[in-house]
Amino acid sequence: MNPIIAMLKENNISDQQISELFEVLTQNPLAAMATISQLGLPQDKLQLLMGQVMQNPALIKEAVEELGLDFSKVEAAKEQLQK
């Protein structure tokens, strides 16, 4: 299991919330950061999660694929951010 998904599940984040989070992430990565902060994760877990995402962006792709979402939307959102 993807470590990001595993950490969210360990902190009692529902499958539906996880799917919604990654759906937001594929559409608007900046909005996803706000969504993550609203999940109520303890500060240390939140920092660990953000660190994993920053150090290994491939984890996002793995999680998106694991959840069956469309990764091309992530790429499109990333291009929008770079403009």
Image (cartoon, rainbow, N blue to C red):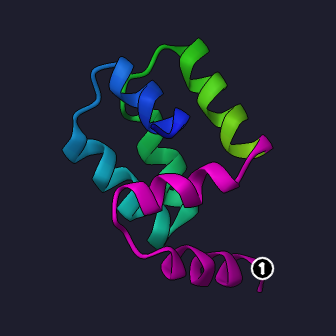
Q: Residue at the spot x=35%, y=56% of the render?
A: 67
Q: Residue at the spot x=50%, y=74% of the render?
A: 71
Q: Position of residue 69 (x, y in %)?
A: 37, 68
Q: Quadrant of the C terminus?
A: bottom right
Q: Assess whether residue 73 is covered by the magenta stretch.
A: yes
Circle 1 packing at 10 Å, graded few (<14), some (14-19), many (20+), is: few
Q: Report the number of numbered marks.
A: 1
Q: Nearer the viewer, residue 6 or 45?
A: 6
Q: Position of residue 76 (x, y in %)?
A: 59, 84
Q: Residue at the spot x=45%, y=60% of the render?
A: 64
Vertical side of 54 occupied by 3: above or below: above
Q: Which residues are magenta?
A: 55-83
Q: Position of residue 6 (x, y in %)?
A: 43, 29
Q: Quadrant of residue 68?
A: bottom left
Magenta span: predominant SS is: helix
Q: Quadrant of the N terminus?
A: top left
Q: Residue at the spot x=20%, y=46% of the render?
A: 16
Kindly identify which residue carries mark 1.
82
Name the kind of residue labelled 1 in the image: Gln
